[in-house]
Image (cartoon, helix red, strand yellow):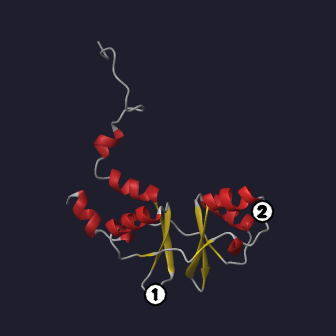
Amino acid sequence: MSLRDSLNDDAVSALGMLDPVALGADESVGTAVARMREASCGCAVVTEHRKPIGMFTERDVLMKVLGKGLSQGTPIADVMTANPQTIEEGCSVAGLISRMHEGGFRHMPVVDAAGRLKGVISVKRIVEYIVDYFPGTVFNLPPRPVQRQTAREGA
């Protein structure tokens, strides 16, 4: 199957979602950052009744918290991006890539048909999915792509 066919046929759930860092809106920025660090995840999803109501990302830490001199005790609801776009786990990978590109998102919450949070997809996971189609080409690239061999190697 070609990459184009797979992008259109494979569901988002085939990518292998990250376990979401889910928080309540009343939790603090400090708690969110600690949980994100523990999970090695660049975002947290703010939920209410298991449904996403906000996103809090590394970029929010820089721009909205540190950039404005807010404390770690600030409620996450004050700095999250409200009403985040989500994608259903059965949607195509091509649809996911399109939505993430259009919105400029690096992470997107994945929900079930009832809108409950199932996981998070990152751009990194999409790149890994695409690399799986071209492993020889990607893994055989030199460390510096513009590197030129000046002398023959070996005997």
* Residue drawn 40% across the image and 58% down it: 126
Relative to 40, is 119 above or below?
below
Image: 83 above or below 17: below
What residue is shown at x 32% (from left), y 17% (from top)?
153
Q: Is residue 38 visible?
A: no
Counting from the top left corner in percent of width and height, residue 73 is at 79, 68
How many labels were placed on the picture?
2
**Along the line of sight, which residue is nearer the eye, 147 or 66?**
66
Three-letter code for the amino acid on which mark 2 is drawn? Leu
* Residue 70 numbered tag: 2
Q: In terms of image quadrants, where is residue 1?
A: bottom left
What residue is disc 1 on?
Answer: 114
Q: CA distance from mark 2 to mark 1?
A: 35 Å
Tell me which corner region of the image, top left, top right, bottom left or bottom right, holds residue 13: bottom left
Rate crowding at label 2 as few (under 14), some (14 to 19) or many (20 or more) other CA atoms within 10 Å.
few
Quadrant containing the C terminus is top left
Residue 69 point in image, percent of width and height? 78, 58
Disc 1 marks which amino acid?
Answer: Ala
Given residues 36 and 26, the one toward you in this image is 26
Residue drawn at point x = 77 percent, y = 69 percent:
74
Q: Name the residue located 60 percent from the left edge and 79 percent from the top edge.
A: 47
Element type at marker 1?
loop
Q: Position of residue 57 (x, y in %)?
A: 60, 63
